[in-house]
Image: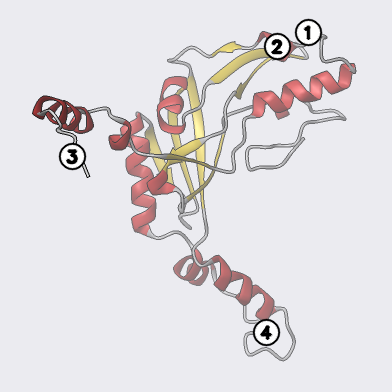
Amino acid sequence: MHRIPVSPLIFAAAFTFLSAPGVASDVPAWVATKTQAFLPQVLAKEKNATGSTDTSTPADSAIQMAPDEPVHVTVSLKLRDKAGLDKFLREINTPGSPSYGKFLTPEQFTKRFAPTEADVGKVVEHLEKSGFINIVVSPNRQLISAEGTAATVQVGFHTTLKNFYLNGVKVFANADAVQVPSALAGIVDAVLGLQNVETAHVQGGALQNTESGEKP
């Protein structure tokens, strides 16, 4: 079998490329949360209401929110030991079970099933690095609220926010599905506060909130 000589210069160049900052292998992976892209949902509903995909709608005119425009977000965290929680709920509602009717106090529930303080710390750290401020953790550690801007939302959750008018009211919605670093995949469930379209639909035909994965 013939050996093909490799130039030391080629080998050195390849090593330099793989070791260089910014190469894909050094970029942390991002994963989806339950928070879907809301703007496409609005567009689809508007097109369906008009009965034509060619008809221009208010959402078609959506423009990207100014980077410094303020946004309040709430990060919902996943419960710990979901399988154990499901089993416990079945048992407390099953006559004859040793746990039947033995409900937990809020403190007991937090200790057994709420996100850990370590997990909460990871989310808080991500929010801080992304530029969010006034970060507040709920007593049961299931919700983390924070103040930011459209720019920090884009940095922290890989989605852009867009403004448009609906029924004469200025609203906004996230144009992309929300993502978080893969290290938070087992911790973050959804991110709320990235759209306020539903508040413009106070009468019949209101859009349901799809921030947590529901469809309108």
Instruction: Name the amino acid, label 4.
Output: Tyr
Which quadrant would residue 34 be assigned to in this image?
top right
Helix, strand or loop status at disc 1: loop
| First along the sequence among labels 4 and 2 | 2
Which residue is pictured at 50% across the width and 34% down the height? 73
Q: Which residue is mark 4?
A: 100
Instruction: Name the amino acid, label 1.
Output: Ser
| First along the sequence among labels 4 and 3 | 3
Helix, strand or loop status at disc 2: helix
Q: Which residue is mark 1?
A: 56
Helix, strand or loop status at disc 3: loop
Which residue is pictured at 87% across the width and 30% down the height? 204
Which quadrant would residue 135 be assigned to in this image?
top left
Query: Is residue 178 shown above or below 40?
Result: below
| First along the sequence among labels 3 and 2 | 3
Query: For this view, does 16 lie left or right of residue 71?
Result: left
Tell me the distance, in whole angstroms, between the alpha carbons under discs 1 and 4. Answer: 57 Å
- Kindly identify which numbered label has been placed on residue 60: 2
| First along the sequence among labels 1 and 4 | 1
| First along the sequence among labels 1 and 3 | 3
Depth order, front residue of 193/6:
6
Query: For this view, does 188 lie left or right of residue 216?
Result: left
Marks 4 and 3: which is nearer the front? 3
Tell me the distance, in whole angstroms, between the alpha carbons under discs 2 and 1. Answer: 6 Å
Query: For this view, does 154 lie left or right of residue 213?
Result: left
Tell me the distance, in whole angstroms, between the alpha carbons under discs 4 and 3. Answer: 74 Å
Q: Which residue is mark 3?
A: 3
Asked if the residue under mark 1 is in contact with the one under mark 2, i.e. CB atoms within 8 Å, the reply is: yes
Tell me the distance, in whole angstroms, between the alpha carbons under discs 1 and 3. Answer: 64 Å
